[in-house]
Amino acid sequence: MLSTAVFPGSFDPITIGHHGIILRGLDLFETIIIAIGSNADKKSFFSLESRMQMISLLYDDQPRIQVEVFSGLTIDFCRSHGVRFLLRGLRTSADFEYERVVAHANRKLYPDIETVFLLAAPEHSYISSSLVKEILAYGGDASSFLPPGLKLDACLPGK
C-alpha cells in the first residue's frame, strides 16, 4: 500500500462520484488528504467553511481521511506536506485530456509527484458538481447524486 495521496478539488459540493473515488483510493493509499481548493476569484455555491464542514462530517469516522483547505498550486500543497501522489478521478475522455495536461505540467514543476487516475464508476460518470448545483439551485432533490450521510441541508445557501 502506498503512503499518502492528495485528492484535490473544489468539491462544491462533493458528489457520490468523488466519494466513490475516495473509497476506492483507500484500497491503494494508507491516507487520503481531501484538499479543498480555495479560489477567491471563483464564485462558489457553498462557502469554503460549509464545504469543509460537510466533508469533515462525512468522513468523521474514517481516520485514514484528512480534510484540509489550500490555496495556490496543488503541487505546492503536496510538496509542503511531503506527499508524492495525486489522486484524480476521470469521468470522460475530456476529463482525461485535461488531467493528462495538468499531470505533465505538475511533473515538470515537481518531478517527485505521480498522478494516479481512477475511472469513475459507470453509474457515476455523468454526475458533476455543476449538475448537482443546478438541481439544488432550482430546489430539486439531488440526494441520489450525493454521498450517503452527507449533511447538506444546514449548509445550503440562505440557511
Image: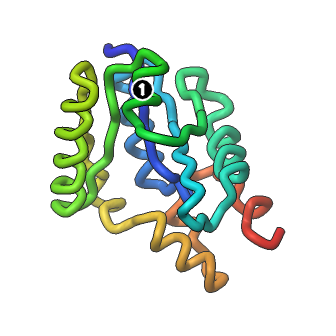
> Label 1, on which residue?
78
Q: Residue at (39%, 20%) from the top-left corner? A: 83
| Residue 154 image offset from top left, x and y in percent | 79, 60
Numbered disc 1: secondary structure: helix
| Residue 106 image offset from top left, x and y in percent | 26, 35
Q: Is residue 36 left or right of residue 119?
A: right
Quarter of the rendering containing residue 125: bottom left
Quarter of the rendering containing residue 133: bottom right
| Residue 2 image offset from top left, x and y in percent | 32, 15
Q: Examine the rendered structure and indicate whether residue 104 appears above or below residue 132.
A: above
Q: Residue at (24%, 58%) from the top-left corner? A: 95
Q: Residue at (47%, 20%) from the top-left corner? A: 80
Image quadrant where one finds the C terminus? bottom right
Number of numbered callouts drawn: 1
Given residues 79 and 159, the one toward you in this image is 79
Number of other residues with Cα within 10 Å of mark 1, as a class: few under 14, some 14 to 19, many 20 or more: many
Given residues 82 and 63, the one toward you in this image is 82
Q: Is residue 107 left or right of residue 24?
A: left
Q: Examine the rendered structure and indicate whether residue 97 appears above or below residue 20.
A: below
Mark 1: amino acid: Cys
Q: Residue at (60%, 64%) from the top-left corner? A: 44
**Colour basis:** rainbow
| Residue 104 image offset from top left, x and y in percent | 17, 39
Which residue lies most toward the right here? 159
Image quadrant where one finds the N terminus? top left
Q: Examine the rendered structure and indicate whether residue 56 appears above or below residue 51.
A: above
Given residues 44 and 105, the one toward you in this image is 105
